[in-house]
Image (tube, coloured by chain):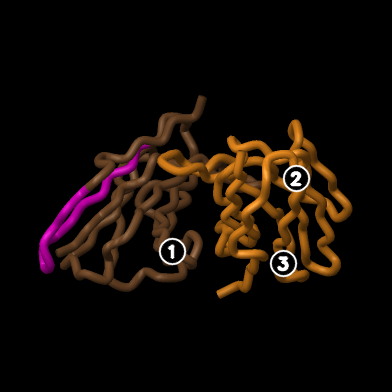
Chain colours: A orange, B brown
Amino acid sequence: ILNVEQSPQSLHVQEGDSTNFTCSFPSSNFYALHWYRWETAKSPEALFVMTLNGDEKKKGRISATLNTKEGYSYLYIKGSQPEDSATYLCAFAAGNMLTFGGGTRLMVKP
Amino acid sequence: DVKVTQSSRYLVKRTGEKVFLECVQDMDHENMFWYRQDPGLGLRLIYFSYDVKMKEKGDIPEGYSVSREKKERFSLILESASTNQTSMYLCASSLLDGRLEQYFGPGTRLTVT
C-alpha cells in the first residue's frame, strides 16, 4: 500500500484568508498527482491532474504546485470564501489505480 | 458531461444479508472503481476493473466481490454484510490513460445493523 499523506487534517479560516495544504507521496514510479474537492452531499470533483515536475495549475483562486523529485504538492486558496468549505483530497496515480490521502477538511467562516 | 449513477443514496441492511451496490457510467470509460470512505481514512480502493469481466483487488477487498458483465455497469457485492461494512461507498470511472482522472457517483451510505 502506497503512503499518501495530507496535512493538516482540518483547517478553520476566516473569509478572506489565504491558505494552503500539503500532500506528500512516493517520489518513485510517478505517473500523476490529482487534487479533488469534495463538498458535503456532493460527489468529489477533480480540480487538477498534474503530471510533470514543476507543474503549476490554476483555477480561479485555487492553484497547485508539484515537486515529483521530493514527493510533495501544495494546494493554495487565495482569499477563501465560505463556498470553498469542503474536503480536499489528493491522490497518487500509479499503474491503473489511485491511492488517496486522508484529506484536508477546510471550513471557511463568514 | 460524464454521468456516474449509483443505485441507492441510502441503504439499511441487516447483518448477514447479501447486498448489491450498482454503478452505471455513460461515457464509455474503460476503468471503473469502488471505494469506501470512512472518517479520517480518506477513500480506500476496494476493487477496480479495466475491462468487461476483468477485476483487480484494491487495498481492502476482503468481504467484497465485484461483477462487470457490461462495460457501463460495475457492481459491488457484500456476500454477507457485517457491521464493520457500514460506510459511504463511492463508485468512479475513468479513461484507460496515464492520467486516471476519476468521475465519481453520488455515493451510497450503507448502514448494516
**Lower sequence index among marks 2 and 3:** 2
Using the image, tell me which numbered label, if any, was put on residue B39. Answer: 1
In the image: residue B56, left or right of residue B68: right
Disc 1 is placed on an element classified as loop
Do the residues under discs 3 and 1 have CB atoms within 8 angstroms? no
Q: Amino acid at mark 1?
A: Pro
- For disc 3, the marked residue is A24
Residue at the extreme top: B1
Is disc 2 placed on a helix, strand or loop?
Answer: loop
Please report, as a chain letter, where disc 1 is located. B
Amino acid on which the number 2 mark rests in the picture: Asp
Lateral position of residue B39 relative to residue A76, left or right:
left
Query: Which residue is painted at 65% across and 49% down in the image?
Result: A35
Q: Chain of mark 2?
A: A
Residue B33 at x, y = what percent?
Answer: 44, 52
A70 or B76, which lies in front? Answer: A70
In the picture, measured across the screen, residue A99 lies left or right of residue B39, that is right
Callout 2 touching callout 1 (CB < 8 Å): no
Q: Crowdedness of circle 1 by 10 Å Cα count: few (<14), some, many (20+)?
A: few
B31 vs B100, left or right, is left
Q: CA distance from mark 2 to mark 3?
A: 24 Å
Residue A24 visible: yes
Residue sitting at x 44%, y 39%: A42
Query: Whole-percent x and y of residue A72?
Result: 77, 63
Question: Is residue B98 in view from this perspective?
Answer: no
Q: Residues within 10 Å of mark 2 (few under 14, many from 20)?
A: few
| Whether residue A73 is situated above or below residue A77 in the rendered picture | below
Residue topped by disc 2: A17
What segment is highlighted magenta in the picture? B11-24
Q: Does the magenta-highlighted stretch encompass residue A68?
A: no
